[in-house]
Image: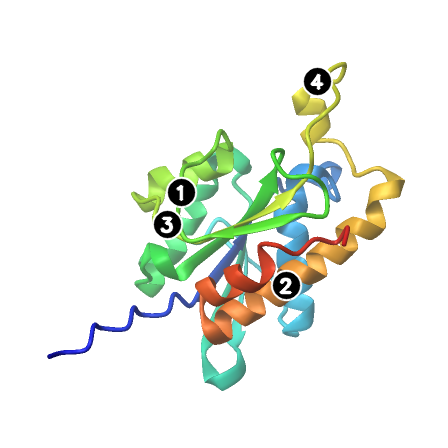
């Protein structure tokens, strides 16, 4: 009797941080994906280059075990992020499953993160674009909580606003957690990282 096949590990090769490119959007809630990508570039000692073909800031190198790694920050604005992802995917002949997208989520409190293997856009314009251009929902994603706005504040003003001073330390800590989770997923696969980090929080 044959043993059942062990499912292949999902190891991300391209990590995409979502955000908006202008200086006025730096450090805003909607740009927490950019912040995560910047931290990874710093950890991995990679230097960003503006890349016209890929419509974004791009860098690449070799990670542990000699595995190729790539980072991308689309400069297309959030609602066209998928164009940049598709350009990199086609150039390097990647599969959607090898692309990990990091972005903000209003349904999670600040300090929480959630890693998934696939799923819908959940109303996020960057993810709608990603799904449309990759022609698939089956790619991993890491959501970082930015919390909902209070009922008296406009949602757009909330996501495009900066984190409150009281949230800064929590955001720094959850970005470190996110980077740790991504590094583990590169070594042992997304599912292992999910099992260890989906219950974690910078608030703990």
Residue 179 horizontal side relative to residue 102, left or right: right
The relative height of residue 131 versus residue 113 in the rendered view (above or below) is: above
Of residues 146 and 159, the one nearer the viewer is 146
- Quarter that holds the N terminus: bottom left
| Mark 2 secondary-structure assignment | helix
Q: Nearer the viewer, mark 1 or mark 4?
A: 1
Quarter occupied by the C terminus: bottom right
Mark 3 and mark 2 residues within 8 Å of each other at the beta carbon: no
Furthest toward the bottom, the residue is: 65
Residue carrying label 3: 86
Q: Nearer the viewer, residue 145 or 126?
A: 145
- The extreme front residue here reads 1
Query: Marks 2/1: CA distance?
Result: 21 Å
Of marks 3 and 2, which one's residue comes earlier in the chain? 3
Picture residue at 50% right of the left edge, 37% below the top: 126
Residue 154 circle label: 4
Q: Is label 3 or label 4 in front? A: 4
Instruction: Name the residue rendered at 70%, 53% in the picture.
Output: 201
Q: Which mark is residue 179?
A: 2
Q: Earlier in the sequence, mark 3 or mark 1?
A: 3
| Residue 18 visible in the current orientation | no
Q: CA distance from mark 1 to mark 4?
A: 27 Å
Badge nearest the viewer, 2 or 1: 1
Residue 191 is situated, as x and y percent measured from the top left of the image, at 45, 63
C-alpha distance separating marks 3 and 2: 23 Å
**Circle 1 is placed at which residue position?**
119
Task: Identify the mark nearer the N-term, 3 or 4.
Answer: 3
Q: CA distance from mark 3 to mark 1?
A: 18 Å
Q: Is residue 90 above or below residue 128?
A: below
* Residues marked 4 and 2 touching at CB (< 8 Å): no
For mark 1, does the 10 Å Cα neighbourhood hold few (<14), some (14 to 19), or many (20 or more) residues? some
């Amino acid at each position: 009797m044959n043993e059942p096949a062990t499912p292949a590990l999902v190891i991300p090769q391209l990590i995409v941080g979502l955000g908006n490119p202008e200086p006025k959007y730096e450090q805003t809630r909607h740009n927490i994906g950019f912040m995560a990508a910047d931290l990874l570039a710093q950890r991995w000692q990679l230097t960003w280059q503006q890349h016209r073909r890929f419509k974004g800031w791009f860098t690449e190198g070799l990670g542990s075990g000699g595995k190729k790694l790539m980072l991308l920050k689309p400069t297309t604005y959030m609602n066209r992020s998928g164009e940049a992802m598709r350009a990199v995917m086609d150039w390097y002949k990647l599969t959607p499953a090898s692309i990990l997208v990091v972005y903000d989520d209003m349904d999670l409190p600040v300090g929480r993160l959630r890693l998934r293997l696939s799923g819908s856009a959940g109303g996020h314009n960057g993810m709608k674009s990603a799904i449309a251009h990759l022609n698939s929902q089956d790619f991993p994603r890491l959501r970082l909580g930015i919390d909902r706005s209070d009922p008296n504040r406009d949602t757009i003003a909330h996501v495009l606003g900066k984190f409150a001073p009281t949230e800064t330390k929590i955001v720094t800590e959850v970005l470190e957690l996110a980077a740790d989770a991504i590094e583990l997923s590169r070594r042992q696969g997304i599912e292992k990282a999910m099992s260890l980090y989906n219950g974690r929080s910078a608030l703990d």
